[in-house]
Amino acid sequence: MFRVSFLFIILGFTCISCKSEDKNKVVDSEKNIETLLNERYNKLLSYNIDSTAFPRSYSLEKKQIKKVPSKDWTSGFFAGNLWQIYKLTGNKAFKQRAKQWTAFIEKEKFNGKTHDMGFKVFCSFGNGLDIEGDNQTYKDIIITSANTLITRYNPHIKSIRSWDFNKDKWQFPVIIDNMMNLELLFEATKISGDSTYHNIAVNHANTTLKNHFRPDGSTWHVLDYDTISGQVRGRVTHQGISDDSAWARGQGWAINGYTMVYRYTKDKAYLDRAIATANYFINHKNLPEDGIPYWDFSHPDIPNISRDVSAGAIVASGLVELYKYTKNEAYINYSKKVVYSIKNKNYILPESIEAPFVLNHSFGDWSKRDEMDEPIVYGDYYFLQTLLRLQSLNTN
Ligand code: GLY
């Protein structure tokens, strides 16, 4: 699955020198990787500014950037990456560019056709607010977006509807990914003092906690609820290999999502949920030695399938936070291993690739047979978030 490249030769060499006793060589190899990362970061700055063309992924085969409009679920990650690179480097050019791309997302605050409001608005405006401090415009946009998102809440089911397609198959589909959108609601309550958003987020988290998980700690992808009885009609997959499989990114959304819900609520039930799914993930017999999972833990063709670096990064980021609450070294060790592997084992794109992405080997969507083993914008987002979280752990 891995393409042999010039970069592999460089990083393979630097990886050997990492193990060397020669201290200077270790410093040199780290410098090479940081230089490489900075070169990748600069590709984001040189990407053409266009409010209708958010970079989503890159096809290495077609040598083509996939560009999407702001309504796409991934649109907020590019601005989020720019904000995060600004935090990592202190280079104001990234902040200025982040502001421009963030502004292009604003119209999504009225888009009630999707549950992905958190991914779009919080990854962009949320990161911006964190950096800008008291930015009333950003606060207002987050509140308006939260008001739009809660129009998808069904008080009978006590959940936020995820998707509107496949109406012939599903009455009220809720996907595990939806946990991530709750952060926008928790923050909306913090900003406004109105507990409505927080309460809806808690109800959604409780319904998912009750129904979405298997006894071994893993999660289903899609749950379909009956709109009359409020009961579960079915437990299936959309992006995994089979209904009962453990789709790697879905496990990541659960781990990262419940750790985040614990941050806002301090309810131990959510912490226990995150721990159970994290333990399932990091102890799984099919998790490769370098910590980067195959795209589905239950795929019958392992090891001959693609990895998903985005899933590894989502979990790595979540486990830095889970480590803060549990002090379980296994969690921080996993996060550090993922960062080490990304930096040293051919997951960073070579400089020659002219596309505004940092990492290779994310796995998009099996149901569409799309973006399988490619650079994808959200892989970068959670990798950068992991770096920042590790940095803040070391400095606090
Ligand atoms: N729906 C978000 C994902 O593909 O993970």
Image: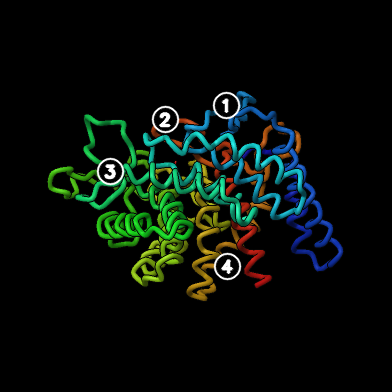
Disc 1 + disc 2, Cβ < 8 Å: no
Q: Secondary structure at mark 3?
A: strand
| Of the pair 212 and 140, the residue shown nearer to us | 140
Residue at image coords 51%, 63%: 319
Please, what is the three-letter code of the amino acid marked with disc 2?
Lys
Residue under label 2: 368
Residue bearing mark 3: 236
Secondary element at tag 4: helix
The Cα atoms of the two marked residues, 3 and 1, are separated by 34 Å
Q: Nearer the viewer, residue 380 or 396?
A: 396
> Is 300 drawn above or below residue 263 in the view shown?
above
Q: Are there few (<14), some (14-19), or many (20+) residues within 10 Å of tag 2?
A: few
Amino acid on which disc 4 is placed: Asn
The alpha-carbon separation of the residues under discs 4 and 1 comes to 40 Å
- Horizontal side of 86 relative to 315 (left or right) equals right
Q: CA distance from mark 2 to mark 4?
A: 34 Å
Residue on which disc 1 sits: 52
- Of the numbered discs 2 and 4, the one sitting upstream in the chain is 4
Compute the Cα span from label 3 to label 4.
32 Å
